[in-house]
């Protein structure tokens, strides 16, 4: 769960540049009906949801609302939700139960559900007495209006999906920091058989190249040092107007802000082109880290998953990355217990992981989702077998992560300083180009500040963290 602190960016400057601002109420009009109305947003799910929450807060700010980091202070509580697995939705139901107490204390409190679960469950959520509004990922422009009506006692729902909405003109309201998310596209057309995302986020569409570049320049001017370009499949990005693909976009971003680190997530193995790999090698500020979800190592399962590649193709792409960028860090997503998965299929996944040696992995038990193609295949792998297979996968990954991190000992890495480490005030932390957490000793004479790039010599490692000393 993530919450937001108060914003730092200059919203007025941006909203003055766009057409939508002209239709908005004047500051005095805003004051009349939104005086002291405070908004609290809680975000679940993926990084795109995080960025969407920032977009919603940006919109609400433009309409005169304030944001707060404390639900107790709020007049409006919005939960931005995820529907990817059953346990993601269970968490939201539990949270809603808890919010009953807030509503008891404050009858005027407005509670809204945004995001993928709102899109999936629609009116069913509104039937719960507690929920005043349900708004899907392509209808966030209507949030201020629906909030206003909800505060007058009228429940609201907006769940239409769009073929064109990209929120190109809305500046997200970001917490102060050095690292920002920038969504470059929305939706997904891949229709993997297990996945709700194409249903909850609709058709794939890309932002214009220039608007992405402009946002990055704005972030740079506001002190950000690192940007992660987001999409369900960033490598199928396409700006029809300028004829640019994802590699072209990366080049434009890397050239426009050479002093900022660029990352991207997620890339699909089917679209991992040589051009993209070459682009990564050509610019120092494009981080040498690729999240390339494999899902399974069995061709039979990959086909049932509708992933459109074989394990051989996947390994060939990984080898192309390793050849061009030997130091490149790699991570993956793995699903265990997909319908009909046998011990042999499971072993093939372990084999693939053994061959790639990932730096990190997100590993999940298969969760059947209503209306997806694999829903109809049943859920025939027992919970016990799923759990055992998942432990085996996790064990293999922990060993690989440790091995990869131990290999960093003795190297000098460039680290972007993030601030005090969570455990020990005498230590600070940052991230390497390869996206690894690096901890280093700190005192008042250290001579660097948050947002600086420093050099750290690694002298110790665990499977999750690197430790070292700064070098001049
Ligand atoms: N677009 C990204 C993934 C988004 S969802 C991609 O294709 O890589 C993030 C991850 O959740 C997926 O990669 C998958 O591993 C997992 N996931 C999606 N649906 C799931 C389901 N029904 N059960 C278990 N895991 C699932
Ligand atoms: Fe889901 Fe597949 Fe699209 Fe990723 S590529 S969001 S897993 S349908
Ligand atoms: Fe979840 Fe929607 Fe993201 S289902 S993973 S919040 S796209």
Image (cartoon, rainbow, N blue to C red):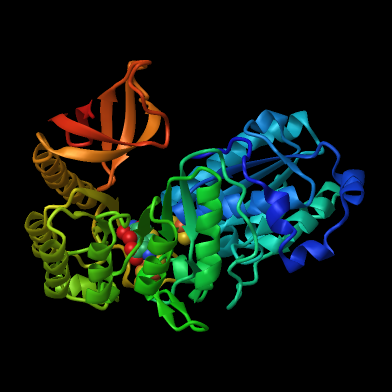
Furthest residue in direction front, as rendered: 472
Q: Quadrant of residue 424?
A: top left
Q: Nearer the viewer, residue 103 or 276?
A: 276
Q: Position of residue 190 (x, y in %)?
A: 38, 76
Residue found 86% across the figure and 39% down from its top:
35
Q: How many marks?
A: 0
Q: Position of residue 285 (x, y in %)?
A: 32, 55
Q: Is residue 300 left or right of residue 66?
A: left
Q: Position of residue 129 (x, y in %)?
A: 72, 47
Q: Nearer the viewer, residue 28 or 308?
A: 28
Residue found 16% across the figure and 52% down from its top:
358
Q: Is residue 71 left or right of residue 366?
A: right
* Image quarter for ligand 2: bottom left
Q: Is residue 202 above or below residue 75?
A: below
Q: Position of residue 56 (x, y in %)?
A: 65, 53
Quarter of the rendering occupied by the C terminus: top left
Q: Is residue 350 left or right of residue 183?
A: left
| Residue 153 in view | yes
Residue found 42% across the figure and 74% down from its top:
237
Q: Is residue 302 above or below residue 289?
A: below
Residue found 33% across the figure and 30% down from its top:
429
| Residue 81 in view | no
Q: Is residue 148 left or right of residue 465?
A: right
Q: Is residue 286 above or below residue 419?
A: below
Q: Is residue 312 above or below residue 329?
A: below
């Amino acid at each position: 769960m993530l919450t937001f602190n108060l914003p730092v960016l200059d919203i007025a400057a941006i909203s003055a540049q766009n057409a939508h601002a002209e239709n908005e109420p004047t500051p005095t009009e805003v004051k009349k009906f939104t005086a002291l109305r405070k908004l609290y947003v809680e975000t679940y799910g993926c990084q795109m949801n995080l960025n969407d929450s920032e977009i919603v807060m940006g919109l609400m700010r433009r309409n005169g609302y304030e944001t707060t980091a404390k639900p107790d202070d709020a007049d409006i509580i919005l939960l931005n939700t995820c529907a990817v697995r059953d346990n993601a939705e269970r968490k939201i139901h539990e949270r809603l139960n808890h919010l009953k107490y807030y509503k008891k204390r404050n009858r005027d409190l407005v509670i809204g559900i945004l995001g993928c679960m709102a899109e999936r469950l629609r009116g069913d959520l509104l039937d719960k007495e507690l929920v005043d509004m349900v708004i899907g990922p392509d209808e966030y422009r209507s949030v201020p209006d629906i909030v206003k009506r909800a505060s007058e006692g009228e429940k609201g729902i907006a769940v239409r999906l769009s073929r064109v909405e990209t929120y190109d003109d809305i500046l997200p309201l970001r917490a102060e920091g050095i690292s920002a998310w920038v969504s470059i596209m929305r939706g997904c057309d891949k229709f993997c058989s297990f996945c709700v995302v194409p249903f909850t986020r609709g058709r794939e569409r890309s932002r214009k190249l220039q608007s992405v570049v402009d946002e990055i320049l704005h972030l740079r001017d506001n002190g950000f040092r690192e940007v992660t370009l987001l999409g369900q499949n960033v490598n199928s990005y396409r700006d029809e107007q300028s004829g640019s693909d994802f590699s072209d976009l990366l080049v434009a971003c890397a050239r426009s802000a050479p002093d900022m680190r660029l990352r991207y997530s997620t890339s699909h193995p089917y679209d991992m082109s040589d051009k993209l790999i070459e682009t990564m090698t050509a610019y120092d500020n494009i981080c040498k880290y690729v999240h390339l979800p494999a899902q399974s190592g069995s061709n039979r399962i990959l086909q049932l998953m509708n992933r459109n590649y074989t394990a051989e193709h996947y390994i060939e792409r990984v080898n192309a990355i390793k050849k061009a960028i030997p130091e490149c860090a790699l991570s993956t997503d793995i699903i265990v217990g997909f319908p009909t998965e046998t011990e042999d299929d499971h072993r093939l996944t372990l084999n693939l992981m053994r061959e790639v040696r990932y730096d990190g992995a997100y590993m999940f038990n298969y969760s059947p989702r209503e209306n997806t193609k694999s829903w109809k295949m049943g859920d025939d792998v027992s919970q016990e077998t799923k759990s055992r297979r998942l432990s085996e996968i996790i064990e293999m990954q922990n060993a690989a992560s440790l091995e990869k991190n131990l290999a960093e000992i003795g190297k000098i890495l460039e680290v972007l300083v993030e601030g005090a480490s969570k455990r020990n005030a005498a230590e600070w932390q940052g991230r390497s180009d390869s996206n690894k957490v690096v901890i280093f000793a700190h005192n008042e004479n250290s001579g660097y500040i948050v947002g600086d790039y420093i050099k750290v010599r690694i002298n110790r490692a665990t499977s999750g963290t690197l430790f070292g000393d700064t070098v001049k």
